[in-house]
């Protein structure tokens, strides 16, 4: 996470928490869990090894894809976009998705292992998020990510989309 993300809290201890059963029944729970992710990544008996692409801002799509390839070829199981990566003038989302998946596919060919990249589909509108998620799915990724800042309704809506499309959905707290 971000180094100064919880600066206002010096210490916190949760003593007890009670959630009404009626409220709990309204939540389906995650569509998938770590077991499904392990099955899709064919990784068992050890922790996943992943990282976030750095520098998170400033790379071209081609250089971003190169970092994805080098990281995965070097032993990572997956890489992910950072929450700040969206669709900036120096690297539009479609370019990033194409080069990232090229890096994933090249690393799979080089290592013989299943590799992955969490693509950030966060956007200003649901239509744009659907478009990005559909494109990521067409490219062959099994996991997409969204940022918490999109709001509860949008998070739930993307959760429904992920269930319908058999995709793993990662939620970034930032």
Image (tube, rainbow, N blue to C red):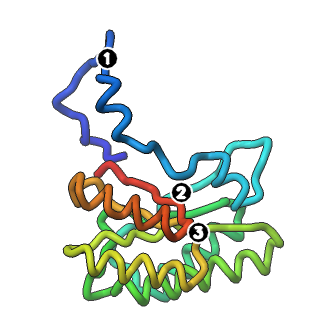
Q: Along the horizontal axis of the image, is 153 left or right of 77?
A: left
Label located before the other in sequence (2 or 3): 2
Instruction: Verify CB contact (< 8 Å) between mark 2 and mark 3.
Output: no
Residue closest to the eye, 19 or 70: 19
Q: Along the horizontal axis of the image, is 2 left or right of 115?
A: left
Q: CA distance from mark 2 to mark 1?
A: 32 Å
SS category of the residue bearing label 2: strand
**Vertically, is 50 above or below 91?**
above
SS category of the residue bearing label 1: loop
> Residue at the location (40% across, 88% down)?
94
> Residue at the location (67% across, 46% down)?
35
Image quarter of residue 129: bottom left
Image quarter of residue 85: bottom left
**Vertically, is 20 above or below 104?**
above
> Residue at the location (33% across, 78% down)?
58
Instruction: Rate crowding at label 3 as few (under 14), some (14 to 19) or many (20 or more) other CA atoms within 10 Å.
Output: many
Work out which residue is located at the far right of the displayed protein and give it. 112
Q: Which residue is mark 2?
A: 51
Q: Which residue is mark 1?
A: 17
Q: Is residue 144 among what the camera can see?
A: yes
Residue closest to the eye, 155 or 22: 22
Residue closest to the eye, 104 or 157: 157
SS category of the residue bearing label 3: loop
Q: Which residue is mark 3?
A: 142
Label located before the other in sequence (1 or 3): 1
């Amino acid at each position: 996470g971000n180094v100064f993300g919880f600066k206002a809290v010096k210490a916190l201890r949760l003593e007890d928490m009670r959630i009404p059963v009626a409220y709990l029944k309204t939540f389906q729970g995650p569509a998938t869990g770590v077991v499904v992710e392990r099955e899709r990544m064919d990784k068992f008996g050890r922790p996943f090894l992943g990282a976030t692409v750095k520098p998170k801002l400033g790379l071209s799509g081609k250089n971003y894809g190169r970092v994805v390839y080098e990281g995965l070829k070097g032993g990572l199981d997956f890489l992910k976009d950072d929450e700040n990566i969206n669709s900036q003038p120096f690297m539009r989302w479609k370019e990033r998705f194409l080069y990232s998946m090229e890096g994933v596919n090249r690393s799979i060919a080089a290592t013989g292992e299943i590799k992955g990249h969490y693509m950030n589909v966060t956007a200003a509108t649901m239509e744009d998020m659907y478009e990005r998620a559909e494109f990521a799915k067409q490219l062959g990724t099994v996991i997409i990510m969204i940022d918490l800042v999109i709001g509860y309704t949008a998070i739930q809506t993307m959760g429904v989309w992920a269930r319908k499309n058999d995709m793993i959905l990662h939620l970034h707290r930032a």
